Amino acid sequence: MPIRAAVFTAPGQPLTIEEFERPQLQTGEVLVRVDCCTVCGSDLRSLRGDRAVPTPTILGHEILGTVIEVCETPPCDLHGQPVVVGDRMTWGVAASCGTCDRCQQGIPQKCRSLFKYGHEPSDKHPLSGGLAECCHLRVGTPIVKLGDELSDLEACPASCATATVAAAFRVAGDIQDRSVLIFGAGMLGLTAAAMAKVQGAESVIVCDLDPQRLLQASRFGATHTLSWIDDSEEMSSAVRSIAGDDGVDVVLEMSGANSAIDVSPRLLKIGGRFVLVGSVAPSGTVPFDPEQIVRRLLRIEGIHNYTPTDLAIAVDFLTAHHQDFPFESLVARTFTLDEVNDAITFAQDTRPCRVAIVPNLN
Ligand SMILES: [Zn+2]
Ligand SMILES: [Zn+2]
């Protein structure tokens, strides 16, 4: 039986459903039936032409599925358990070699021969994205098995959004009893609010332009919501009126807006940490005062993708707290593979946090 997939050929063009041969698995490889794929903001940027992606390609990298075939020497998941047919699982956005200098340095997400799901040419690497009936997992893919307690819609964003947020918290340091300011109340920002709350932050301030998203933030652990103010002095005093005169301990920048990045160093306490996550498209430069960074001992760090451990933490977090926050409500609608272009139009027009594709609905 051929395997169907939605293929992206050029920005602005509808995806086309194509048929692929069932792959011959090599050592360490796995074939997974895709149960759910949520459409990430990066997929939408690729579709618009705002993100370079080789074509033709099968988009989709927030994927969850059930193993239907393993090779003779199957891989193990991140907890050391061999992968077997019937396992329900998610996996990292990328496979890495484990031996190059970057992998050895502890940044496998920047492996010199990185294989990125939803981002490989489908003529060379068929079935490498989530908008398909099956996904072919390569060697070096971090795999996490999922328990039954998590629904597909709760668990699906784990492998991009939740794991990226876990990476941001890894560099943010201990936030117990600290104040955290989050810019952007999309999938990342809302997940970050929930994680900050769970990790014992004293105040979780979420800032966004959109009043609807701020309303959502208060259901995801935000202790305070703040409507974006386009004046840095006023923004600074609004944040200080919540967090105190010194400012906040941590800023998590998840909006990608240069105006938020510009004001952030002024909102931080001495010794504060500024974690940049949202700037994933070219957006020009932001001026900053280096003296302020030096004298105020600020630490600025960028996060892109994540490590396998971040993915395991993300799944543990969702498993433990899926009943504390309405994660499933962040997926606005579910579509079949044949409706994939309707899903994209819906996502572009209404900008929900996520839409989901369920390729094997029937
Ligand atoms: Zn993504
Ligand atoms: Zn490597």
Image (cartoon, grey):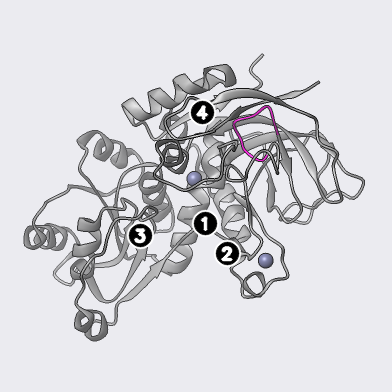
Q: Is residue 124 visible?
A: yes
Amino acid marked by disc 2: Lys
Front position among marks 2 and 4? 2
74 above or below 48?
below
Residue 226 place in picture, x, y as percent = 18, 48
Tell me if residue 81 comes above or below residue 69 in the rendering: below
> Mark 4 is on which residue type?
Ala
Name which residue lies at 67% across and 13% down: 362
The secondary structure type at the circle numbered 4 is strand
Q: Which residue is mark 3?
A: 201
Name which of mark 3 and mark 1 comes first in the sequence: 3
Work out how far the residue at label 3 is from the one at label 1, CA to CA, in angstroms: 24 Å
| Residue 57 image offset from top left, x and y in percent | 59, 38
Q: Are marks 2 and 1 in contact (CB under 8 Å)?
A: yes
Q: Nearer the viewer, residue 303 or 17?
A: 17
286 vs 189, left or right, is: left
Label 2 or label 4, whichever comes before in sequence order: 2
- The residue identified by callout 4 is 356
Given residues 202 and 154, the one toward you in this image is 154
Label 2 or label 1, whichever comes before in sequence order: 2
Q: Is residue 174 visible?
A: no
Within 8 Å: ligand 1 and the Cβ of disc 3? no
Labelled pair 1, 4 in contact (Cβ < 8 Å): no
The residue indicated by pointer 1 is 305
In magenta, the rendered stretch is 128-134
- Residue 78 in percent (x, y) is at 71, 55
User: Quick check: 173 left or right of 71?
Assistant: left
Q: Which mark is nearer the camera, 4 or 3?
A: 4
Which one is in front in this view, the residue at disc 2 or the one at disc 3? 2
Q: Secondary structure at mark 1?
A: loop
Q: CA distance from mark 2 to mark 3?
A: 30 Å
Q: Is residue 129 magenta?
A: yes
